[in-house]
Image (cartoon, helix red, strand yellow):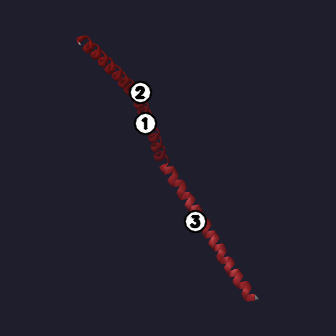
Amino acid sequence: MGKVYTLILRYLKKIKKSIIFSIQNLNLFFDKKKTIDTAYKPILDEKLNEVKGLKDKLNVIQNKNASFEKQIKHLRSSVIKKEKLIKNLQDIISQRQN
C-alpha cells in the first residue's frame, strides 16, 4: 500500500507542477496579448475609420446611381413620347400630301 501512496503523491506533485506551469504560461500569454492589443489598437481604429469612410462614400455613390437611373428612365420615356409625336406628325403630313 505504501508504494501506491507514493505513486499517488508523485503523480499529484507532477499534476501540481503542470498546473502551476500552465498558469504561468497563461499569465504570460495574457500579458503578451495585452501588449499586442495596445500596440495594434490605434492601427485597428484607423482601419475601422477608413472602412467607415469608404462605406459612406459607397452610400453616396449608390444614391447618385439611383438618381441617375431615375433621370435615364425619365429621358427614355421622354424620347419615346417625342418619337411618337414625330411619327404622328409624319403620318399627318403624309395624309395631307395624299
The secondary element bearing badge 1 is classed as helix
Residue at x 71% of width, y 80% of height: 9
| Front residue of this view, candidates 30 and 80 | 80
User: What residue occupies the far right of the structure in this picture?
Assistant: 1
Identify the amino acid type marked 1.
Leu
Give residue 77's mark. Answer: none
Residue assigned mark 3:
25
Query: Which mark is in front, 1 or 3?
Result: 1
* Whether residue 82 is situated above or below residue 55 in the rendered picture: above
Q: Does residue 91 appear to the left or right of 65 in the view shown? A: left
Q: Quadrant of the C terminus?
A: top left
Query: Which mark is in front, 2 or 1?
Result: 2
Q: Which class describes the residues within 10 Å of circle 3: few (<14), some (14-19), or many (20+)? A: few
The secondary element bearing badge 2 is classed as helix
Residue 85, by quadrant, is: top left
Residue assigned mark 1:
58
How far apart, in angstroms, are the residues tagged by discs 2 and 1? 18 Å
Dot 1 or dot 3, earlier in sequence: 3
Residue assigned mark 2:
70
How far apart, in angstroms, are the residues tagged by discs 2 and 3? 63 Å
